[in-house]
Structure formats: C-alpha cells, structure tokens
Amino acid sequence: MRPLEKFGESANVQQSSSDETHQRTSAGTGAEFRMPNVSPDSAYAATAKVAGRLNATAVSQQEHDALLEERQKLLDLKFAGAMTRADENRLSYVRWSLDRIEDAKYGASLDLLEQHVARYENLLNEVTAFSAQLNQRGRRR
C-alpha cells in the first residue's frame, strides 16, 4: 500500500527518464507535486570522498616518503627502458596512492575553490543574460 492510499487517496508516481524528476499526483485533488531528486549515488560518492580523505590522512610521513621513493625508483626503471608489466601496474598504484594523500591534504580547499569558481561562472552567465536583455530593450526604443 502506498502512503497516500492508506488515507483514502490513490497516488500516481511518474518518472521521466530525460530529466529524472519525480511527480506525484493526488487522484482526489489532481494537484501535482514535484519531489526532490536526491540520488543515492551522489550521496554515496560524497561519503566515499570523505571516507577516502579520512583514510588517507592516517598515512604517516614515513609511509608517504616510502611511496615517493618507490615512485622515483619505478620512474628510473621506466626511463631506463627496463620496466616490466608488473612494474607498470605498481607505478600506477603508487601514483594513485600519492594522489589520495595529496587529495586528503588539499582536496577540501580545492573543493571550496571549485564552488567559488562555479558561483562566479553562474554570476557571469546571469550578468551576460541581463546585459543582453538591456541591449534588447535599448534597441526597441
């Protein structure tokens, strides 16, 4: 039984695949309600990012230095032309590990910077649209 049906109303839920909006229409009133689209995937991704950063902050300076040293040795092998497939895989893993450590150190600041950039880009779009509207009105007169 749907939540509205227990109160004597039937509910129709429609999902549009193009914009992923959810609509609920009450059969008794015909009113349409737009429900927020909160994707569990986006919540999972945000949680995973925070968990990964927390995990990476637990790496000691000695472990970080060991990864840097291992990366240098693997790069020396690569440039010497003596790198095996296993070495390539290990280099990829070491680079990924170092990226996670760097993200734990600077990721929150970069996320904040990204938010500010997005706001300024949005402001630019709004000012451009407003300017275009003013230009259109100026031409009409």
Image: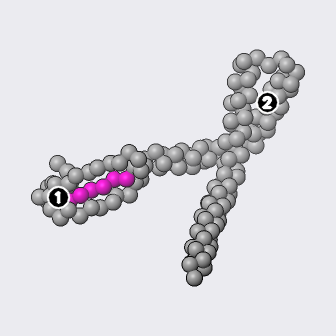
Q: Read off the magenta span.
A: 21-26
Which residue sits at x=62%, y=47%? 53
Which residue sits at x=15%, y=62%? 28
Q: Label 2, on which residue?
A: 70
User: Percent from the top left, x then y, of residue 4?
Assistant: 19, 57
Asked if residue 22 lies in the magenta stretch, the reply is: yes
Taking depth in this image into account, of 33 and 137 the one nearest to the observer is 137
User: Percent from the top left, x then y, of residue 85?
Assistant: 72, 18
Magenta segment, prevailing SS (helix, strand or loop): strand
Taking depth in this image into account, of 23 and 81 the one nearest to the observer is 23
* 57 versus 94 height, above or below: below
Label 2 sits on a secondary structure element that is helix
Choose top left, top right, bottom left or bottom right for residue 96: top right
Q: Earlier in the sequence, mark 1 or mark 2?
A: 1
Quadrant occupied by the C terminus: bottom right
User: Percent from the top left, x then y, of residue 76?
Assistant: 86, 26
Asked if residue 4 lies in the magenta stretch, the reply is: no
* 99 versus 79 height, above or below: below
Looking at the picture, which amino acid does disc 1 mark? Ala
Taking depth in this image into account, of 111 and 60 the one nearest to the observer is 111
C-alpha distance separating marks 1 and 2 = 66 Å
The residue at the far bottom in this view is 141
User: Percent from the top left, x then y, of residue 93?
Assistant: 68, 30
The residue at the far left in this view is 8
Label 1 sits on a secondary structure element that is loop
Res 71 label: none
Q: Label 1, on which residue?
A: 27
How many marks do you count on the picture?
2
